[in-house]
């Protein structure tokens, strides 16, 4: 086996590991609200999320193509395999650190920041496709704001519609609805998050001269969908606890509003081929719903901690990506 093939195989393995970690790191996005309101048992919620993540991951490839060619040109990238491997290692390390401390940080920010840092370390700022990078950055930064606003509005509308409803009966109905909204949330998660690893593997195949277009090979789709579903089945209980209970006390009606909002924003981004952070979106949806319900009922201290993590993930992962590129250069 030659050196190039060995590195490509390493990249595929690390990309699938990243996808697996992304699955258990972001499981909370789809099921935290339904578990916290007891609409679903943890076991059933995780099985549902894993299945719907798998289905979602097989449905679209537009986001993957954006990752493949939006940040840098894979057909003209110096030390391309080293860049990609360094980015994956950096993103995996950051994901594991934030998972360990139960911080709902963004896997999307981590991998995009790491790729950017590694590309800059390899070929300088001129190697970055600023048009594509800015579009991705706008999607990452604006989607939580949009999710907060929509969550606020959706819950305000629900309050008006059900203001005279019997509370016990309403909670029971919304608890049943949460099963469907959790499924939709998990499906939308799969349509966006799994595609990041698909894009990275496709990028590596192009760099290695094994693929000639940005179209995602079907085996890559299946492999990434499977890795994310398996990761989801493991669950990320530390983050589920944060998203599902520490931001605010979630009732069934809150959960439905947050799930619908999160799914709509994520799926909308998927349709226009832009990656977003599912962590940011669903957390912001919950914050928006909570603010609409009762501002004082939101734990803004936790929200502040999450915001700080969101802000620092891109630059830290970029620095890590650049650092690991220089380290790998000594061995590859």
Image (cartoon, helix red, strand yellow):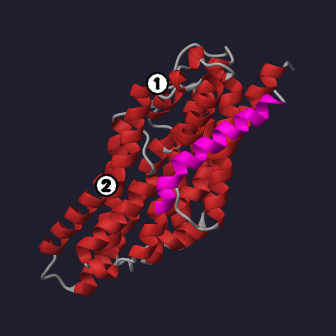
**Residue 319 in sight from this viewpoint:** yes
Rendered location of residue 179, percent (x, y)? 40, 65
Q: Which quadrant of the structure image shows residue 42?
A: bottom right
Kindly identify which residue carries mark 1.
129
Residue at coordinates 34% horizontally, 34% vertically from top-left?
Answer: 272
Magenta region? 308-330
Q: Nearer the viewer, mark 1 or mark 2?
A: 1
Percent position (x, y) of residue 170? 25, 79
Instruction: Identify the mark at residue 145; answer none if there is no mark.
Output: 2
What is the distance, in whole Å, between disc 1 and disc 2 at their CAs? 25 Å
Q: Is residue 233 above or below residue 228?
A: below
Which one is in front, 217 or 279?
A: 279
**In the image shown, does 117 or 145 lie closer to the viewer?**
117
Q: SS class of the residue under badge 2? A: helix
Does the magenta-highlighted stretch encompass residue 321?
A: yes
9 in magenta: no
User: Residue 197 got which mark?
Assistant: none
Residue toward you, 95 or 224: 95
Q: Residue at image x 46%, y 24%? A: 129
Residue 3 in the figure: left or right of residue 8: right
């Amino acid at each position: 086996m030659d050196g190039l093939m060995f590195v490509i195989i390493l990249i595929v393995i690390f990309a699938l590991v990243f996808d697996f970690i992304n699955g258990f790191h972001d499981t909370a996005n789809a099921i935290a609200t339904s578990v916290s309101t007891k609409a679903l048992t943890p076991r059933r919620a995780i099985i549902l999320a894993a299945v719907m993540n798998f289905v979602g991951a097989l449905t679209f490839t537009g986001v993957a193509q954006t990752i493949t060619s939006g940040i840098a040109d894979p057909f003209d990238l110096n030390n391309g395999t080293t860049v990609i491997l360094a980015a994956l290692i950096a993103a995996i390390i950051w994901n594991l650190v934030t998972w360990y401390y139960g911080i709902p940080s963004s896997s999307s920010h981590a991998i995009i920041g790491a790729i950017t840092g590694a590309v800059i370390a390899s070929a300088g700022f001129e190697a970055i496709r600023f048009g594509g990078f800015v579009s991705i950055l706008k999607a990452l930064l604006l989607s939580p704001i949009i999710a907060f606003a929509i969550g606020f509005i959706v819950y305000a509308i629900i309050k008006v519609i059900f203001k005279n409803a019997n509370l016990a009966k309403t909670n029971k109905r919304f608890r049943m609805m949460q099963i469907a909204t959790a499924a939709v949330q998990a499906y939308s998660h799969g349509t966006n998050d799994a595609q990041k690893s698909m894009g990275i593997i496709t990028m590596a195949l192009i760099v290695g001269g094994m693929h000639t277009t940005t179209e995602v090979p079907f085996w890559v789709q299946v492999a990434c969908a499977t890795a994310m579903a398996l990761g989801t089945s493991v669950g990320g209980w530390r983050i589920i606890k944060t998203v599902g209970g520490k931001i605010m006390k979630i009732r069934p009606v809150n959960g439905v509003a947050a799930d619908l909002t999160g799914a709509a924003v994520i799926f909308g981004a998927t349709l226009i081929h832009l990656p977003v952070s599912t962590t940011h979106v669903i957390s912001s949806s919950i914050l928006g719903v909570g603010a609409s319900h009762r501002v004082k009922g939101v734990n803004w201290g936790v929200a502040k901690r999450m915001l700080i993590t969101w802000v620092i993930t891109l630059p830290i992962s970029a620095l890590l990506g650049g650092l690991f590129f220089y380290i790998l250069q000594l061995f590859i």
